[in-house]
């Protein structure tokens, strides 16, 4: 792509502002736009502003592909920030690869994928499932009840979790999947079953509005997070804000970032976020990943002066950024990201409180080539 000092750098932004996953995707959109604002306010890249083309796929998987195609039909647009559900990423992937474009994907996922045209900015299973399994086995017991939304991420993520638990002496006592838009009443049968089976932990891979409805229904049925917690890789501050503090208390999430961590970069990030959007209630790990990925891109663009994917790839591999979560780095081996690894529990006030964290970023192992339980345990951890 030719340099042109007059024109902005056009990028696609593909997150849902409506539909079942909009609670979380709106936070990713805001993280992306905040970073774009920061870069533009500092003079852009080579004097050119970054100009986002924003489309809302309404949480409908085929629309992510249709909109990605539409965005990439503009010869000036070669980079897209977007996607939350793995099903939407899988839909967009062939479009991106066919055109040798670039997708920045700021979401945890099930692993077992590589594309030279994607930078994976969310946690892979060795960075979240593995430490969560160790923590839960140590603190709660071996009997896990799986409940998830019915699509690729929950099913694959549960396959990985089952294998990890087997290594650690755990067992899966039940496994159920519901549609993404499951309502409170749809969980009645499962809530009765949980009472009968009496597991040690509920592991939820529900995403979207089903998450809010399940936590609410669990609380209304007498469920208590301090006695039998729901553990998750996706449930976050934005969802807790909707679920409410009483129904969220005691539940557990593993993620690279929580809003209340104490780093200088996080303080600055939250101040700027509050100034732009008025509140930090919905700041989440996926929002932070989206924010950081835009900065990784802009730093790369400063070096290439071009959005050509082959040039960007060369400088993005190994690229580092001082993110709100701590320092992150794109792993040149696999295009995934070295990330912090944390486990937190919601307290009585609806705030995530850190239970433990690794003291340095964890190298991504998206294929679980080294799936030993003690792989993560070998990284020094802090326990709070
Ligand atoms: C997900 O679908 N990767 C959350």
Image (cartoon, rainbow, N blue to C red):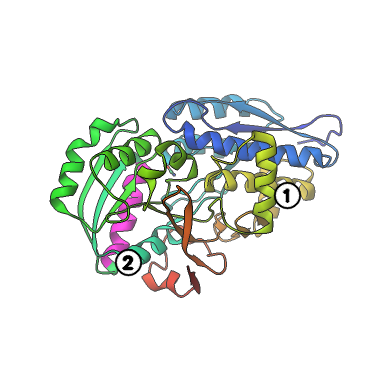
Whichever of labels 1 and 2 marks the residue nearer the N terminus, that label is 2
Q: Is residue 155 magenta?
A: yes
* Mark 1 closeness class: few <14, some 14–19, many ≥20 residues within 10 Å: many
> Where on the picture, by quarter, is residue 360?
bottom right
* Residue 71 appearing in the image: yes
State whether residue 78 appears in this view: no
What is the secondary structure assignment of the residue under circle 1?
Answer: helix
Nearer to the camera, 382 or 2: 382
Q: Residue at x 51, y 30 (%)?
A: 16
Distance Cα–Cα, label 1 vs label 2? 43 Å
SS of the residue under disc 2: helix
Q: Residues within 10 Å of mark 2 (few under 14, many from 20)?
A: few
Residue range highlighted in magenta: 152-166
Disc sitting over residue 53 in the figure? none
Is 91 on the left or on the right of 297, as rendered?
left
Q: Are marks 1 and 2 in contact (CB under 8 Å)?
A: no
Q: Residue 343: where, in percent of width, then height?
A: 45, 59
Q: Nearer the viewer, residue 11 or 224?
A: 224
Which residue bears the numbered disc 2? 139
- Residue located at (49% from left, 54% from top): 123
Q: Ligand 1 lies in which image quarter?
A: top left
Q: Position of residue 76 (x, y in %)?
A: 72, 30
């Amino acid at each position: 792509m030719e340099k042109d000092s007059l024109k902005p750098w056009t990028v696609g932004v593909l997150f849902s502002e409506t539909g079942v996953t909009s609670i979380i995707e709106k936070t990713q959109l805001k993280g992306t736009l905040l970073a774009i604002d920061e870069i533009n306010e500092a003079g852009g890249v080579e004097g050119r502003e970054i100009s986002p083309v924003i489309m809302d796929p309404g949480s409908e998987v085929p629309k992510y592909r249709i909109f990605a195609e539409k965005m990439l039909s503009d010869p000036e647009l070669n980079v897209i920030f977007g996607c939350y559900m793995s099903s939407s990423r899988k839909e967009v992937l062939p479009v991106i690869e066919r055109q040798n474009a670039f997708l920045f994907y700021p979401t945890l996922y099930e692993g077992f994928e590589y594309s030279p045209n994607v930078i994976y900015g969310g946690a892979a299973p060795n960075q979240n499932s593995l430490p969560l399994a160790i923590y839960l086995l140590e603190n709660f017991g071996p009997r896990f009840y799986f409940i998830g939304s019915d699509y690729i991420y929950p099913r694959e993520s549960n396959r990985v979790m089952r294998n990890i638990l087997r290594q650690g002496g755990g067992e899966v006592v039940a496994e159920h999947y519901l549609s993404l838009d499951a309502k409170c009443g749809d969980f009645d049968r499962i809530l009765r079953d949980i009472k009968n089976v009496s597991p040690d932990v509920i592991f939820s891979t529900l995403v979207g509005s089903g998450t809010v409805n399940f936590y609410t229904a669990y609380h209304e049925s007498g469920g208590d997070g301090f006695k039998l917690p729901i553990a998750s890789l996706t449930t976050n501050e934005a969802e807790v804000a909707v679920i409410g503090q009483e129904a969220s208390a005691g539940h557990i999430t593993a993620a690279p970032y929580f809003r209340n961590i104490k780093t200088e970069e996080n303080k600055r990030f939250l101040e700027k976020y509050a100034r732009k959007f008025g509140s930090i209630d919905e700041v989440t790990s996926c929002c932070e990943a989206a924010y950081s990925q835009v900065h990784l891109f802009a730093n790369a663009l400063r070096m290439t002066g071009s959005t050509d994917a082959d040039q960007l790839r060369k400088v993005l591999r190994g690229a580092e950024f001082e993110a709100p979560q701590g320092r992150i780095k794109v792993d040149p081996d696999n295009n995934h990201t070295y990330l912090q690894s944390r486990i937190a529990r919601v307290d009585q006030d609806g705030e995530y409180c850190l239970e433990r964290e690794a003291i340095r970023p964890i190298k991504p192992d998206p294929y679980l080539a080294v799936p030993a339980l003690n792989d993560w345990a070998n990284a020094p951890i802090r326990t709070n």
